[in-house]
Amino acid sequence: MKQNYLKIRTKNHTAQPLKNLIEVNTRCVFRLGSLTPTEEIFPRGVALNKPIVEINTAEACHNSGDKILMKTLFSNNYVRSAEWESVNSQDRMNWNLFPAIIKHKNSCKGQGIFYIENQEALDEFINTRVNGSLGNYIIEKYYNYSKEYRLHVTKDGCFYTCRKMLKEDAEERWHRHDMNSVWMMEENELFERPNNWSDIEAECVKALNAVGLDIGACDVKVQSEKGHDRGGNPEFIILEINSAPSCGNVTLIKYEEQLRKMLNGN
């Protein structure tokens, strides 16, 4: 009998080791950012109305891959995230939440993101863009929280997490990405798990559900201990949720374990 394997649909080269790895009993696909429709992946199965299991639909990947759609869904579902507007919005004229961040709707890995210190910097950004392109950008309030975590979550909660820490020689220190940061796993003493971790985890699941993903990597900014309130709980905001995170060796192991659990119950 021909073996069936979970199909992995992604342009993320770091996720390639997951391909041809998990044997399944029916047609299954796991999307990491892919927008390929199911009927193109399983044309015969769709035509014959065969059962097909999807982990992350194309629509959910689209929702999380477009910053405007993602932030709109966050707002509609009351996810704790930064105040924002479309740069093309008339409300932008009254924007006074500086400093701020401008992001292209398809920004990733530190590209297409800009630090805006004041109104003069915002005006300069706008004046150097063609008016028609402004609709592709959002502006959001910048929170100078010193900690950032990535929680990989399903609807059941977090199954793997790391803290993202700036390198000592990082030149850009207002945002974190692979080029200027290192990853600390939960076992590392520098991880410093916040007191209200269960609240953070719940909010990440809320973000996951808002965009419709089954598995997602949620980036969260958290206050340092100096910013804790009387109850000892730091403030935090959800930055974004990603359906196609970069996958190191440990991430691949954790994703394989989680996928097997979701598909086979073990």
Image (cartoon, rainbow, N blue to C red):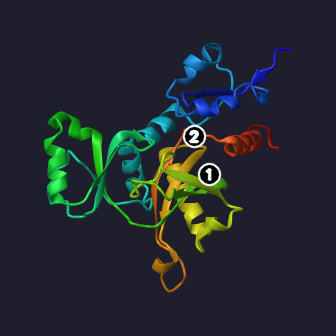
Out of 140 and 3, give the one closest to the viewer: 140
Question: What's the amino acid at mark 2?
Answer: Ser
Q: Which mark is residue 217?
A: none
Q: Residue under circle 1?
A: 153
For this view, does 146 lie left or right of residue 201?
left
The percent position of residue 232, horizontal first and vertical second, equals 55, 81
Out of 219 and 178, give the one closest to the viewer: 178
Tag 1 or tag 2, which sits nearer the N-term?
1
Q: Which mark is residue 246?
A: 2
Instruction: Tell me if I can see residue 91 in this picture.
Output: no
Instruction: Label 1, secondary structure: give it.
Output: strand
Seen in the picture, residue 114 relative to 237 is either above or below; the reply is above
Question: What's the amino acid at mark 1?
Answer: Val
Residue at figure coordinates x 64%, y 13% from the top left: 44
Residue at figure coordinates x 69%, y 40% from the top left: 252
The quadrant the N terminus occupies is: top right
Instruction: Label 2, secondary structure: give it.
Output: loop
The percent position of residue 260, horizontal first and vertical second, equals 77, 39
The percent position of residue 103, horizontal first and vertical second, equals 33, 46
Residue farthest toward the front in the current orientation of the protein: 169
Residue farthest toward the bottom in the current orientation of the protein: 230
For this view, does 170 lie left or right of residue 140?
right
Q: What's the distance in space between the residues labelled 2 and 1, CA to CA?
A: 15 Å
The percent position of residue 38, horizontal first and vertical second, equals 57, 23
Seen in the picture, residue 4 relative to 244 is either above or below; the reply is above
Q: How crowded is mark 2: few (under 14 residues within 10 Å), some or many (20 or more)?
A: some
Quarter residue 246 falls in: top right
Quarter residue 239 falls in: bottom left
Seen in the picture, residue 36 relative to 67 is either above or below; the reply is above
